[in-house]
Every structure is written in structure tokens, then in C-alpha cells.
Amino acid sequence: MCAADSVINMRQHRLALCEVHFAEWVEKISLSFIKKHRMFEPDDRILVAVSGGKDSLSLWRILLKLGFQADGLYMDLGVEAGCSYSKRSCEYVEKFAQNIFPEVKLHVLDVADIYGKTVPEMAGRRKGGRKKFCSVCGLVKRHEMNRIARELGYTVIATGHNLDDEAAVLFGNVLHWEAEYLVRQSPVLPADGVGLVKRAKPLARFYERETAAYAIINNIEYMQEECPYSVGATSLRLKEVLNSMENSSPGTKLQFYFSFLRAKENSLFPGCKRPELRACEKCGQATGALGLCAFCRLLEPASAHHKELEDEI
Amino acid sequence: MVKVIFRNAEWQIPGNITVQKLITDLGLNPQSVLAVRDGKLVNNETRLGDQGEVKLISVVSGG
């Protein structure tokens, strides 16, 4: 029995822990989740996608603390919106890297420097512009993470998705019965021969309340403001509904997500498979589409592949 | 009275209530915020106390 005051009460686990034991618990559970889903081994070179937020910085800290080889990748998406959002997020990442783990490597990539356009500019070119911003942003991030990992020889990409993120995605896909997306949703996505680097979500076991608590306890300074483009995003509304259910029935989110993973293992969708991947004709990265991948079509002159892209992302 | 901060708003609140009561009185969901008192994380059963400041931090992110 610990004599210290508990700082967090996790009703879904019927567990209240002090600062020290909570941090130890998060690290221990992370390691067992990484092993259970065979995410990576100590000799893997891991590229952690860091945004400056609580989840990715906590993830980076946990992986380094557990002794994994984990370098960071920050992507400057060019989100300005009157508050220098991307620049300030980058400052949190750089500060974390310099002050907490000065020996690790941090790669910083500026999307506008490479492609001549910021992500808001890319999204603005599309029908629905701002409304579709999050989809375009996700597409650009996935493409660039994979490209950098391939070019620099990383064997795994780790992202800071937490259980709330995963439950919200699952909820959205169930509402529309998106069987193909449901089949793909997993804490670990294997590498593919055509150049898709293995992707892992080691924090998918934790509520975001817990990843935030881990960041606070470990004095990780992170970007607390939301991306200005996320206002009104569907994922936030889905999280609100799930949190409302969680509040009256603790464990709802945990059960929803893990029951889904178990059902998937037991062939919930037997006739549904991941689309066959091939190399994009332009960039060479893996895509389910014929010809150009969604990212290259996004960069094509307006209207060239407009309709297909609308349908795909 | 204790100073309570959430996003850009500040209030002076009597300290004889718990964090949980504060959160629900403000119309927030206890699942979506954490409370930090004088820089230290505190659980929802903690009484606010009559000095210092309590900051509520939203934990919901995404887009």
C-alpha cells in the first residue's frame, strides 16, 4: 500500500495511483502492449512522429526510457492561422529534445520548403477546403512520415495515437459501416513489400486523460492549444459522445475498442481484405490506387484528379 | 477563495468543494479535463483548499 497521495483515479481500472506509481504503471503497460502486438524489438530503429502535443512527446519519452532507439520527426505543416501554431509546436518539440534527451536525433521537415505549399494551402485548393483540412493534413503526414522513414532507414514509425483517438475512429467507421477501414484499424500495421514502413501505436492502450497526466507528472511542456483548424472536427464530436458515455459507465471506451480488436481477430469481417498495394508511378510510395497515390494527386494541378481524390480521402 | 483557471477564463471560488464538483459545476466532463494545483496534478476527490491556484487542463485533442 502506497502512503503517497493518489493523483489520478482511473475508474475503468478501479485504480488510483500516486505520481511515481502512475508513471511506472504507464511505462510497464506500454512495454507489455508493445510486446503483445509485436510492435518492435530493441534492435529496431524507430521514428517517432512528434507534433509537440502531450501524446507524441509522452510516447517519445516512454520509448527512450524503455531503452528503445527512438528518433523524432517533426513536420512543419505551415499552420499559421494568426497564432504561429506550427512554429510554436516546433519550439515545444525542440525544447523537449534539447532539455530532456539531448543525445537523441530530431528531424525537422518543412512541408512548404519541399512542396512549395503549406498544408492549409493544399487543403484550400480542394472543394470543401477548410472542412476537409484534417483529411488532407492526415494524408500529407502519413505520406511524409513513410517517405522519411524509408529514406533514412527506420524500420518502424511510432505515432502517439491514444485509446480515445482509436475509439473515435472506430465509432465513426461503425456509424458508416466502413468495413474496409474497420479491417485496417489496428495498433500495429505491418510493413509491405512495396515500401510501406511498419507503423505502431504504443499508446493505444491509454485514455488521453492518462497520456496528459503522464506528461504533466514528468514535467513535459507541450502544446495545449488545439490546432485552429480542428474546431468543429467530427472526431472531437465523437470523443464528446464517448466521454459522456464513459462518465456514466466507466470502461465504455476501453471495452468498445478492445472488444473490437478481439472480434477482428475472430474474423468479424471474413470477406473483407486490405486493398492490394502497388508503387505510386510518381513518388514510388505504396498506394491502393492505380497510377498516382492520393498525395501526388493532391499536388497535381487543380481539377486533374479532383473527383477521385474527394472520394478517397 | 481559490483562483481557478480554465483556458482564458479565471474565477475566484470557495475552496470547500472537490475538484470533481468544480468540474461538473463548470459544465465540463470529468473525462475531458485534469486539475493541476500549484503545478502538481491532483485527483478529482481533492478539496480545492483556500489558497493558491487550480488550473484545469483540457486533455481532448485531435482533428
Image (tube, rainbow, N blue to C red):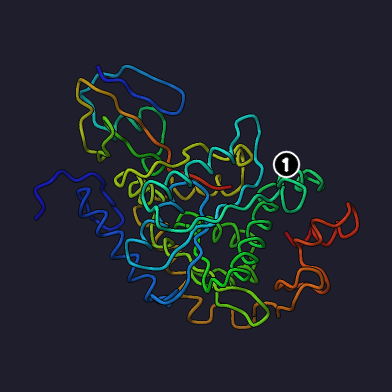
Name the spot of residue A144 as percent of width and height, x first: 65, 60
Name the spot of residue A285 as percent of width and height, x first: 71, 71
Q: Which residue is painted at 30% across and 47% down in the image?
A: A218
How packed mark 1 is, by other alpha carbons closer than 10 Å (few <14, some 14-19, many 20 or more), is some
Q: Which residue is painted at 72% across and 47% down in the image?
A: A112
The answer to which of B1 and A182 lies nearer the viewer is B1
The answer to which of A179 and B42 lies nearer the viewer is B42
Residue type highlighted by circle 1: Arg
Please determine whether, in this image, residue A235 is positioned above or below residue A82: below
Q: Which residue is painted at 32% across and 16% down in the image?
A: B12
Name the spot of residue A32 as percent of width and height, x first: 33, 71
Residue wearing tag 1: A130
Please determine whether, in this image, residue B24 is positioned above or below residue A172: above
Name the spot of residue A139 as percent of width and height, x first: 68, 58
Helix, strand or loop status at disc 1: helix
Please determine whether, in this image, residue A153 is positioned above or below residue A73: below
The answer to which of B35 and A65 lies nearer the viewer is A65
The part of the image, by quadrant, that contains residue A152 is: bottom right
Quadrant assignment for the N terminus of chain A: bottom left
Relative to A163, B16 lies left or right: left
The part of the image, by quadrant, that contains residue A236 is: top right
Relative to A290, A265 lies left or right: left
The part of the image, by quadrant, that contains residue B54 is: top left
Q: Which residue is painted at 38% across and 48% down in the image?
A: A209
Quadrant assignment for the C terminus of chain A: bottom right
